[in-house]
Image (cartoon, helix red, strand yellow):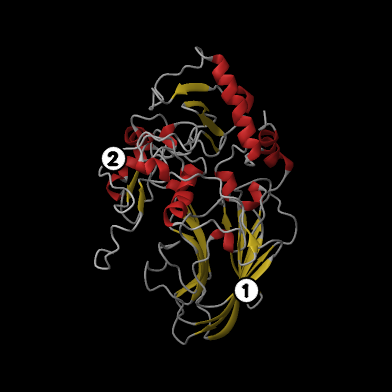
Amino acid sequence: MEELGELDNTLFLYILGDNGASGEGGIEGTIVEHRLGHGIVDDPDEMIDHLDEIGGPLSYPIAPAGWALALNTPYQWTKQVASHFGGTRDGMILHWPRGVSERGGLRHQFSHVIDVLPTILDCVGVPAPFSVDGVPQQPIEGASMRRTLADAQAPEHRRTQYFEMCGNRGIYHGGWMAVTRHGIPWEMVPEGDRRFADDVWELYDIDHDWSQARDLAAEHPEKLRQLQDLFLIEAAKYQVFPLDDRVTERENPVMAGRIDLLGDRNSITYRAGMRRFTEECTLNVKNRSHSITADVDLPEEAAEGVIIAQGGRFGGWTLYFTGGRPAYAYNYFGMSLYTVRGDEPLAPGRHEVRLDFDYDGGGLGKGGTAVLLVDGERHATGRVERTIPYYFSFDETLDVGVDLSTPVTDDYPVLDNEFTGILHTVRIDLDDRSNRSAEPSEFDGGLHRRVMGAQ
């Protein structure tokens, strides 16, 4: 930009983080994040035995919440807790010499991330579009910060702002802030019925107590009541209701009750080279019976490598060949590995290899029976005692003909694990019966909390 002579005329906005530091590691911390996300707490003594692995390829750690609290000092709480500044407040650096003559200036007017786009549009003189490619656009709800750039004493451009995440909520208005913490960040699969009506509200004078250190709720009950009412107004205006205090459960569209990207489709066919499908871009095989059918040509030498894999070392499943034998492995959070293998190598040539997974039912994360069939005949059978109910991974994907990133099983290498034969197609079919995990006993509590949210 400097070589082009445009550095001083370029607007840079650098936001230091997307929220507060993560307290999701809990009191103990964890060496595998997805375990804690599913309510599994690591044994500290066992973690100490793996201390030297932290930061390496065998770990997926989160530090204990104490580190997050230290990083968020002087603010209270952490990521997820939208009620307190420890979960929301970040610094921002703006650089635009041609538009802001002052160097090193500080601004304290209350702003929100939704103000960034309106500020950029205002500074460059571009109006917000009413439609894009014929699609009407929702109104932009932020407000430009531009007038504060020229004047440190300019009035606040934003007088009111609501906050809400997982039931934690707050409302800022005119220098005051009312907040209530509903949940704890590391309790991502909460037990029991947490009533929103039982949440305790706090009140802070942000103009004089920007770190939210002194709760004034008892001293100014009228102000607190005013802000609580304002939260209801803002939350209704911006479609916050009904409140939903679930956390991990919302990762699974079936459990969350939202539209699945694939709709009602129960079957999908992949071909070799199709890779990097995130979980919501492929069929959801969790908590239900399903099958995986591969049409392959095996080479003269013993076939090796991956037919299809989803997830990796910290949770997932894979259908593959090892030593010419078909195999299926299910990895339960890196804690248990269930493997079903054929006894004999298959002959070269074309074969249909199929894995039928018969889910036990009766709730979430239950076990099932895995049956390997070759050309329609049963080849091997085994049990998977526990399955992953909500999500396999945030960043590992479904890959066809290879297992990218970390491997589901050590039966094949981390790299160079592509299938050595010819993979024509691989098809996933879901049991077309209703999902047996979606029983009333599984959902009543969560839905009850949601409909109670407006209170």
Determine contact: label 2, label 1, CB under 8 Å: no
Q: Is residue 87 shown to the viewer in this render?
A: yes
Of the two numbered discs 2 and 1 in the rendering, the one whose residue sits closer to the viewer = 2
In the picture, measured across the screen, residue 412 lies left or right of residue 100, that is right
Q: Is residue 382 shown to the viewer in this render?
A: no
Q: Mark 1 belongs to which amino acid?
A: Thr
**Circle 2 SS class:** loop
- Residue 151 image position (x, y, % from top left): 36, 39
Name the residue rendered at 28%, 60% in the picture.
7
Distance, label 2 to label 1, CA atoms, is: 58 Å
Determine whether 403 is above or below 299 in the image. above
Going from N to C along the chain, the mark reached first, 2 or 1, is 2
Q: Nearer the viewer, residue 446 or 451?
A: 451
Q: Mark 2 belongs to which amino acid?
A: Gly
Name the residue rendered at 63%, 24% in the picture.
197
For the residue carrying disc 1, how many other residues have a C-alpha within 10 Å: few (<14), some (14-19), or many (20+)?
few
- Residue 346 image position (x, y, % from top left): 53, 80
Identify the mark at residue 65; answer none if there is no mark. Answer: none
Write down the residue under mark 1.
Answer: 269
Q: Nearer the viewer, residue 182 or 431?
A: 182
Residue 246: quadrant of the picture: top right
Identify the mark at residue 105; answer none if there is no mark. Answer: 2
Q: Nearer the viewer, residue 30 or 13?
A: 13
Determine whether 353 is above or below 387 in the image. below
